[in-house]
Image (spheres, rainbow, N blue to C red):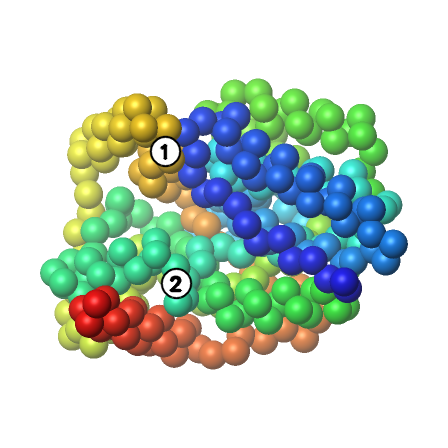
């Protein structure tokens, strides 16, 4: 076994404690198995831009930026990255941080596409000029292989320093970190992956509408007066059923935090990473997959 690619994670959970158990304990269990191997595999971990926190509209995040996650998911990913660094003397480890993912079998973006397909309407949370990066699954897969073969490896973090970060992340999980956590030695062993372009929510709606063949897509912002009660109701259902909800106060905090953009320049320069297709082509192929899947469902 030469490489281990760890992609599994929960993006939502009924509580922060449950989120840490799913995303962090499972990661450490896998690390322990890898350490026990006679031949130590390269461990490539798929984290998230959420671990870094929001960017600004003017400047996408780079790997050397401080981390200030705002959501349970983002904090759990940074928590896991910190665990990884405590194993860096026993395993060669590299971290990939994608932004918003899309592509075949991604059901989050599929819900957006289906809504536009059926109604011609794209509902957005606001009209502010926040900007977002996108990464297609094929580009993430490409970078995973490049990182495994010739990527930088994470530097070691001593256990006492890691313990301080764990405590910071566990304290007030419902609030954004007031002071960002420094990246590992100028972001060593970490790579962002994205398309070069960034979009506003309005731009995303137009992009998806065009891929669906629509000449016009109506962009409608939702009122906060509707979103907050919706979050409350979905959280109540989540607590009663013990299942995660896709829209919660935690998710709303992430949505309203600012821009979510990053640059893959480091991966391009160091590893020769290139996007396999243009963003428009990737959106069109995702729409084609969705339509084919809908036809299969109709036949059943």
Assign the C terminus to one quadrant of the image.
Answer: bottom left
Horizontal side, residue 264 vs residue 252: left or right: right
Tell me which corner region of the image, top left, top right, bottom left or bottom right, holds residue 266.
bottom right
Q: Are marks 2 and 1 in contact (CB under 8 Å)?
A: no
Q: Residue at x 37, y 28 (%)?
A: 242
Q: Nearer the viewer, residue 25 or 220?
A: 25
Assign the N terminus to one quadrant of the image.
Answer: bottom right
Residue 105 has which mark?
2
Residue 119 position, x and y percent, is 12, 60
* Furthest residue in direction left, as rendered: 119
* Furthest residue in direction top, as rendered: 171
Q: Which residue is mark 1?
A: 243
Residue 214 position, x and y percent, is 17, 73
Closer to the N terminus: mark 2 or mark 1? 2
Q: Does residue 71 show up?
A: yes
Residue 120 position, x and y percent, is 14, 63
Mark 2–mark 1 distance (CA, rounded to whole Å): 21 Å
Q: Nearer the viewer, residue 122 or 108?
A: 108
Element on which disc 1 rests:
loop
Tell me which corner region of the image, top left, top right, bottom left or bottom right, holds residue 233.
top left
Q: Is 73 placed above or below 236 here?
A: below
Mark 2 crowdedness (10 Å alpha carbons): few <14, some 14-19, many ≥20: few
Q: Is 108 placed above or below 168 here?
A: below
Q: Does residue 269 show up?
A: no
Tell me which corner region of the image, top left, top right, bottom left or bottom right, holds residue 244.
top left
Horizontal side, residue 204 vs residue 177: left or right: left
Q: Residue at x 37, y 42 (%)?
A: 255
Q: Is 235 placed above or below 43 here?
A: above
Q: Residue at x 86, y 58 (%)?
A: 39
């Amino acid at each position: 076994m030469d490489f281990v690619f760890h992609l599994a994670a929960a993006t939502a959970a009924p509580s922060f404690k449950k989120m840490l158990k799913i995303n962090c304990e499972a990661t450490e269990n896998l690390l322990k198995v890898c350490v026990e191997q006679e031949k130590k595999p390269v461990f490539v971990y798929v984290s998230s831009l959420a671990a870094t926190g929001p960017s600004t509209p003017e400047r996408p995040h780079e790997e050397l930026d401080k981390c200030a996650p705002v959501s349970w998911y983002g904090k759990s990913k940074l928590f896991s990255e910190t665990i990884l660094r405590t194993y860096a003397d026993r395993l060669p480890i590299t971290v990939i941080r994608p932004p918003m993912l899309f592509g075949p079998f991604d059901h989050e973006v599929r819900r957006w596409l289906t809504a536009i397909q059926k109604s011609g309407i794209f509902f957005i949370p606001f009209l502010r000029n926040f900007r977002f990066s996108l990464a297609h699954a094929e580009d993430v897969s490409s970078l995973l292989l490049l990182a495994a073969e010739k990527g930088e490896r994470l530097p070691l973090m001593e256990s006492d320093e890691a313990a301080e970060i764990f405590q910071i992340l566990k304290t007030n999980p419902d609030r954004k970190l007031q002071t960002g956590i420094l990246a590992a030695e100028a972001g060593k062993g970490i790579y962002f992956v994205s398309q070069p372009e960034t979009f506003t929510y309005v731009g995303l709606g137009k992009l998806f509408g065009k891929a669906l063949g629509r000449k016009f897509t109506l962009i409608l912002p939702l009122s906060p007066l509707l979103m907050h009660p919706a979050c409350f109701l979905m959280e109540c259902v989540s607590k009663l059923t013990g299942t995660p909800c896709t829209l919660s106060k935690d998710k709303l905090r992430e949505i309203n935090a600012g821009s979510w953009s990053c640059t893959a320049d480091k991966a391009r320069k160091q590893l020769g990473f290139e996007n396999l297709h243009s963003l428009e082509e990737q959106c069109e192929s995702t729409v084609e997959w969705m339509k084919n899947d809908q036809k299969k469902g109709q036949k059943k």
